[in-house]
Image: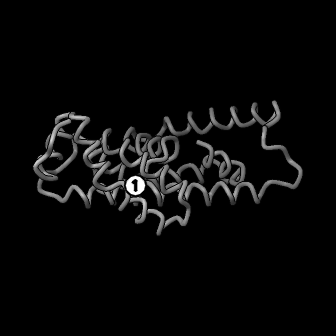
Amino acid sequence: MELFTDDRHAAQELKDGNVEALGYFYRLYEQQLHQFLYAYCRDHDLAEDMIQCTFLKIWEKRKHIDGARSTKNWIYTIAKNLTIDALRQSRYQEKVWTLRPAGTEADHSTLDQIIYADYQRMVSSVLMKLPKRNQEVFELSRAQQFSNKEIADQLNISLKAVEKHLTKTLRFLRGVFKDQQLLIFFLLLKL
């Protein structure tokens, strides 16, 4: 087990791919993060899940560690953003379930699956008409559930640019599917 002199040393080791540095940060911040995240979600299990997701995301983004910035702030920002995204997604799912007619099954019938697949193909073909960057931003936002901040980091563009691309794409889709808006809304939630 390697000893790290301080957070900056451990951050540099993590950036270089040293998994022991990830363990160092986990041991150092796990309890504090749990308390911090619990304050957001009031759910111990979700807080634990978000801690695991946070350290997975840290490992995935280790090359982006900035030695000049506080590693602790970076870790807390990732944890907070992931938790907020999870809570948002949970709220959207609750809204969709409350809109379902009473007595409908959670599993979709074969007909529902066919209709969903057809609409998914239609949306995909329409998206192909958009500029490449709009497609990338939409894919990361809807299919991969990235936050706007994560998309900006991944594509090296500003947060405003991400918002602009999403607004343009959604406006375009609403225009194309204006007669089928509610159906497309449910489809976009699933993408």
- Relative image position of residue 103 (x, y in whole percent): 89, 50
Image point (31%, 45%), residue name = 58
Please state if 30 lies on the left or on the right of 12 as rendered. Answer: right
Q: Secondary structure at mark 1?
A: helix
- Relative image position of residue 24 (x, y in whole percent): 25, 46
Q: Amino acid at mark 1?
A: Asn
- Relative image position of residue 83 (x, y in whole percent): 46, 57
Please state if 38 lies on the left or on the right of 190 as rendered. Answer: left
* Residue 116, image quadrant: top right
Q: Nearer the viewer, residue 78 or 119?
A: 78
| Mark 1 Cα shell of 10 Å, populated few (<14), some (14-19), many (≥20) | many
Q: Nearer the viewer, residue 6 or 108?
A: 6
Image point (32%, 48%), residue name = 26
Return the residue found at the far right: 103
Please state if 8 lies on the left or on the right of 141 as rendered. Answer: left
Image point (65%, 45%), residue name = 187
Q: Which residue is mark 1?
A: 148
